[in-house]
Amino acid sequence: EPEVTQTPSHQVTQMGQEVILRCVPISNHLYFYWYRQILGQKVEFLVSFYNNEISEKSEIFDDQFSVERPDGSNFTLKIRSTKLEDSAMYFCASRAYNEQFFGPGTRLTVL
Amino acid sequence: DQQVKQNSPSLSVQEGRISILNCDYTNSMFDYFLWYKKYPAEGPTFLISISSIKDKNEDGRFTVFLNKSAKHLSLHIVPSQPGDSAVYFCAAKRGSSNTGKLIFGQGTTLQVKP
């Protein structure tokens, strides 16, 4: 069964460093998403991506964040200068119709 | 912004009995609702969904009920199994949203005791 994959599973970085989180969505899906979940809180929408451009972003998704689909399979989230409060689980999701399918997540720890 | 609320942080049921997880929403523009199950250190797994034009959707042991007038939905699991123990999230999508952005509730931790 096709699934969304994410790498790395865990990323530790120093405050101020850049990180890139990678995702491979399900191959025939056209809509891509990033969500995050801070420990103990709800899953929050960050950004949606369709037709090679951002279709919607949350207020969390400021200038420090960017997304890219560099080729036909990968979908990346870049945080330019990480802050302590960026520590969270980051989930990639994709969909063809109404249901979104999530990857296993990347745990980002900012020290 | 508490548009989707799951007021019970936890629920414990006996194996074989029914589990009922509840979810309330405030935005009448939501037109599609989904339930996800999440194990620790894993991503949310899609379980079942319902469109706002329906009041019930069933898939095996899982049934979702939607009461639009009360802005309430519930997930029934019958019979409950120990492997159902997980965090369950309710999520909603606005009809006007072309992006399909989901808004999640806080989650309910279900424990099914053998």
Image: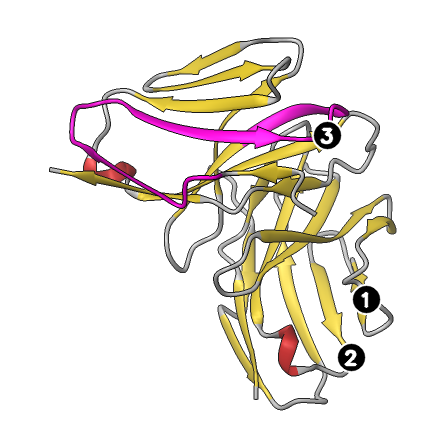
- Quarter of the rendering containing residue A81: bottom right
Parent chain of label 2 = A
B10 or A71, which lies in front? B10
- Quarter of the rendering containing residue B86: top left
Asked whether the residues under the numbered discs 2 and 3 touch, taking CB atoms below 8 Å apart as contact, a structural biologist would say no
In this image, B81 relative to B91: left or right? Answer: left
Q: Is residue B11 magenta?
A: yes
At horizontal 63% and vertical 58% (from top left) the residue drawn is: A23
Parent chain of label 3 = B
Hey, what amino acid is under mark 2? Arg
Q: Is residue A64 above or below residue B102?
A: below
Callout 1: SS: strand
Query: Label 3, on which residue?
Result: B27
At horizontal 11% and vertical 37% (from top left) the residue drawn is: B114
- Disc 2 vs disc 3: which is toward the camera? 3
Q: Position of residue B88 (x, y in %)?
A: 43, 40
At horizontal 65% and vertical 74% (from top left) the residue drawn is: A86
Q: Position of residue A84 (x, y in %)?
A: 63, 82
Hey, what amino acid is under mark 3? Asn
Q: Position of residue B49 (x, y in %)?
A: 54, 24
Query: Label 1, on which residue?
Result: A66
A16 or B52, which lies in front? B52
Callout 3: SS: loop
Q: Is residue B56 magenta?
A: no
Query: Label 2, on which residue?
Result: A80
In this image, A30 relative to A95: left or right? Answer: right
